Image (cartoon, helix red, strand yellow):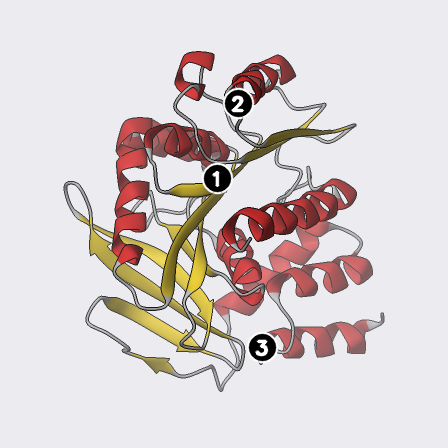
Amino acid sequence: MNRIELMETVREYQVGGISRRQFLVKSTAVLGSLAAANTLLAACNAFPNENPPPVVDESADTAVASTSSELVSQIVTYPGPEQELMGYLTYQEGDTPRATIIVIQEWWGLNDHIKDVADRFAREGYIALAPDLYHGVVTTEPDEARKQVMELGMRDAVGELQSAIDYLKGKSFVNGRFGATGYCMGGGLVFQLAANSTDLSAAIPYYGNPVSSEEAQNISAPTLSFLGTLDGIPAFAYEAVHAVLEENGIANKFQQYEGAQHAFFNDTRPSYDEASATDSWSQSLAWFGEYLRG
């Protein structure tokens, strides 16, 4: 890929011809580093094309909505335990009720990477909602992320995630079957949500702190977990949870990837491992397909 091809890639991304993930793959190939590709992506988002997709107000609880030939994606608001909440809702157009996947953010916030993951599930035919647990705050600084996690609190976060599920229960395009997946902080919250909600039909936590064996007794959703062997989270903590699930007759699988680090699924981070990310995505689609569509 030469400079002209790179410029064509930028233009293709700006007009919606390729996804954010495809843009990163193509631009990384010519620039030689993921960091440089992310810098270019940020510049593209800061200076969008002259003819962006239309912005419409589709309903009373919709703050902003954008449509494309594939997806309807919008920021929605809904009632929470203590305040109004918001999240990124994305789905393919159509009237047929579909299963829903709650996509739970890393500790960086509801950033473009998490929205892209939600879009990927939407293109597979699911309703996807990524709750904004930081209420508008997105960061790239670990100290700020740590501060946001401390202010959020896990119990409050689980309550907000349940509010997102309750909000979707009343939608005609939702068929009432819910799954959840999350990454890092979000992976831990998938465990927490599964242990505290009876609404989940499937759970897929990625490299988050698991619940205790005692809390795992409350999990009834089929659970598929992912962890890299170079992650700081000990494998035995996952194994203990899955042992409880096995004893209780709950469908489960614990997948470890040799040589993969924490955040191996995040294609905007240096820790990204393409082989592990690709395989875990395929397994995730199969798991949700079996327990949300089966």
Taking depth in this image into account, of 65 and 23 the one nearest to the observer is 65
- Residue 267 shows in this picture: no
SS type, badge 3: loop
- Structural distance between the alpha carbons of marks 2 and 3: 43 Å
In the rendered structure, which amino acid carries the disc numbered 3? Gly
- Residue mark closest to the camera, 2 vs 1: 2
Give percent across and percent down for residue 142.
Answer: 48, 32
**Residue 275 position by quadrant:** top right
- Characterize the local packing of mark 1: few (<14), some (14-19) or many (20 or more) Cα atoms within 10 angstroms: many
Give percent across and percent down for residue 103.
Answer: 46, 48
Give percent across and percent down for residue 105.
Answer: 45, 43
Taking depth in this image into account, of 205 and 29 the one nearest to the observer is 205
What residue does disc 3 label?
16
Residue plotted at (46% across, 44% down): 180
Mark 2 or mark 1: name the one nearer the start of the chain. Answer: 1
**Residue 238 position by quadrant:** top right
Image height of 271 relative to 111, above or below: above
Image height of 36 relative to 194, above or below: below
- Structural distance between the alpha carbons of marks 1 and 3: 25 Å
Image height of 246 relative to 159, above or below: above
Which mark is on residue 106? 1
Residue plotted at (68% across, 57% down): 37
Give the residue at the far bottom of this rendering: 51
